[in-house]
Image (cartoon, rainbow, N blue to C red):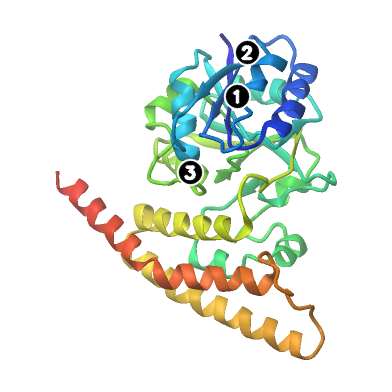
Amino acid sequence: MDLSIIFVNWNSLDYLRECIPSIHEYTRCIEYEIIVVDNASPEKNVVFLTRDFPEVKLIESSRNLGFAGANNLGVRHSSGRYLLFLNPDTKLVSSAINIMVDRLSTLPDAGIVGCKLLNGDLSIQTSSIQKFPTIVNQVLDVEFLRNRWPSARLWDISPLFSDSGKAVKVEVISGACMLMKRDIFEKVGGFSEDYFMYAEDLDLCYKVRQARYSNYYIGQGTIVHYGGRSSTPKWAIVMKWRSILRFFVKTRGYLYALAFRIVMSLAALTRLLVIGGLSLLGKMATDNGSTSGPSQKWRAILKTLLTESGTASSLATSQNATSLQ
């Protein structure tokens, strides 16, 4: 088997019904299997998937294993030389899989390969590639700044706007679409199950680079990624920032994670004050009870940063204990 395509499903049946036919339409001359790991979806309708697509291998977990755990389970049931981790809320609009597999096979130092992700309106999704998070680039993580200065070293998303067609070394490939060789995935220990959701892609890219492989962005391939359709906004924000804190503790230590919490808390408070001031002046609309408005978003971030010290501390203790064994 050349390739195993692994999906983690949580109430995403409608998206899978759109994505799987697009794989069949655009993927040629590759022997592949499609594996769907259902993470105990409350809707209980994933069983209909094999009726529509009998070729799909469905694995039903009795509990929600999180993104990392479910992908690792999918790998254990796979047989491909290459592994493609693909979000259900994606759709191929080009022969992206063929392009990525071809480039991966010709890049001897390649760890993870990714392609250009597009939003639903076909605009470029700037999270297709990333830098590893730091205090500075997270404080300045504003879409306007990244689009205005895409080649800035803090984030360097300039390859997304290049037509060169070359494979470009990057730090982080989006977890929505990650292709890698099975032997490298196994060598680095797969996805770290320290994270329930979010930052698993950061962690895997970090481990791959620590193992002296490179991560590559291939701009010739394009995939639509609708994004964020399997979680509520506030819950997703909380999980994302908890995971980033865990990543800092694991990779940079507890003191750096603490400094990050302090600086980002001040940044969040500043943004809330600015949003409040603009609202009073009538320069910015209020959230009007919305759970996804800017003020609600930054309140959730601030609360998470101020209440996660125990989590970071316990991770640091666990990390120290592991290093002493």
The amino acid sitting under disc 2 is Tyr
Q: Residue at x 65, y 75 (%)?
A: 295
Instruction: Name which of mark 3 and mark 2 comes first in the sequence.
Output: 2
Q: Is residue 276 above or below residue 260?
A: below
Residue 147 falls left or right of residue 72: right
Point out residue 16 in the picture as x, y percentages from the top left corner: 70, 29
The amino acid sitting under disc 3 is Glu
Point out residue 230 in the picture as x, y percentages from the top left corner: 63, 44
Would you name the residue on which mark 3 appears? 200
219 or 40, which lies in front? 40
Q: Can you tell which of label 3 and label 1 is closer to the viewer?
A: 3
Point out residue 76 in the picture as x, y percentages from the top left corner: 43, 20
Judging from the image, what secondary structure is the residue with disc 2 in? strand
For residue 32, the mark is 2
Would you name the residue on which mark 1 appears? 104
Regarding residue 202, the answer to whether it shows in the image is yes
Q: Can you tell which of label 2 and label 1 is closer to the viewer?
A: 2
